[in-house]
Image (cartoon, grey):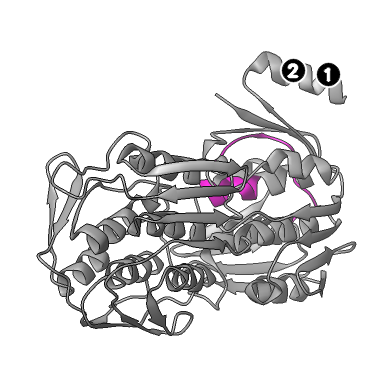
Amino acid sequence: MEQYAIKGGKALEGEVTIAGAKNAALGILAAAIMTDEKVVIENVPDVSDTRTLLAAIQDIGATVEQINEHTVAICGKGIAGDDSLSVDGINIRKIRASYYLIGALLGKYKYANVALPGGCDIGTRPIDLHIKGFENLGADVKIVQGGKIVARADKLIGKHIYLDTVSVGATINIMLAAALAEGKTTIENAAKEPHIVDVANFLNTMGANIKGAGTDVIRVRGVAKLHGAEYSIIPDQIEAGTFMTMAVATRGNVLIKNVIPKHLEAISSKLMEMGATVIEYDDSVRVMADGTLKPTQIKTLPYPGFPTDMQAQMAATLALSRGTSIVTESIFENRFRYVQELCKMGADIRVEGNTAIIHGVDKYLGANLVAPDLRAGAALVIAALAADGFSLIDDIKFIKRGYENFDEKIRNLGGVIEIIDSERDYQKYKLKIG
């Protein structure tokens, strides 16, 4: 089993280039099969989630051509849109984004048979809003034996759909199905995240008619069919934020390239409240910290609020500030499972319900850690890089779901990190590093 071996205590310095947005890529790759023509997608992050989704798309008959590390060409013409169509397998059940194939296939073929999604165990993420949306469009949706969702319709008819709670996944999934429905669909109380705008822009490039993405009301006028297109995915807001907090936690100086600074405003403002310096350029940000960090308060909220996917990384950084910080998680209920791991390193954090009370400490001490999920795993890497001594992080498969060449990028900034797969390798690593 692969692990990260890390020796901390070194300020990160240099430049890092951010990959394409994983959450946008997953919706866009699913949407690419909605036409029988060739679609070329650039800036696709090379992470395990995108590789798994591409494999699933290929398994059901689509043609997938890897043009280069970050560019793929997809043609959905070979998919059999009948009752033989089934998206299943061990790997596809491991990722949450498998559910986007329901909206994509239902929109194109009026039939979908897809395994229930997996992903990180960060709390209840029901798909009832997705099902409600599909049913409003005229589909019959059932969860059948074996843990699969089967949706079918004679035709999809546009409707007014109000989402009871703001849901990124439901917003994208309904948008996918509605793009090829008859008439006009209005999605009210829609999520506004940047990757929703990116999926809508991609669909429009394919000939869809979607307006209002990025606001809480999205209007979709269905079209008869979609066509081929070329498209480049936006930069990953969360990867950028992770390196921003990493620079602050290690008291470093990092230029983070290929970003959209506006997408990072909630993160930037909190880091500046903590005493860090954030300088924005057209497509990059420089983040620096060289002194004592100040405490602050954070509450996760839907975009443009502070992103839940950055909560753990920020908490790991706040635990090194002077004073008491309060972090409130309002999206997912299991997002504090990293706290016990940070406490192994000397953090002083108490969780009460959906709130973490963080009393800053002077330093972390290296420890053996286990990554409980993707973003928590990234937070543990940040803590280990800032710690005195060596740390070993298990279950890095979660981290590799969402970060491309993570260890290589950290090494390029001066961080001391390697992937190992045995205790013997760890001892050799410690002897080598000294």
Q: Measure how far apart labels 1 and 2 are at the Cα level.
A: 6 Å
Residue type marked 1? Leu
Instruction: State the residue lying farthest toward the top.
Output: 424
Would you name the residue on which mark 1 appears?
431
- Is 373 in the magenta? yes
* Left or right, residue 395 beside residue 245: left
Q: Residue at x 38, y 40 (%)?
A: 58
Q: Quadrant of residue 253?
A: bottom right
The residue pinned by badge 2 equals 427
**Residue ID at (86%, 43%):** 414
Left or right of 180? Residue 278 is right
Residue 386: x %, y % from top left: 78, 47
Q: Is residue 334 visible?
A: no
Q: As displayed, is residue 75 above or below residue 358?
A: above
- What segment is highlighted magenta in the picture? 360-380
What residue is shown at x 39% (from left), y 56% (from top)? 37
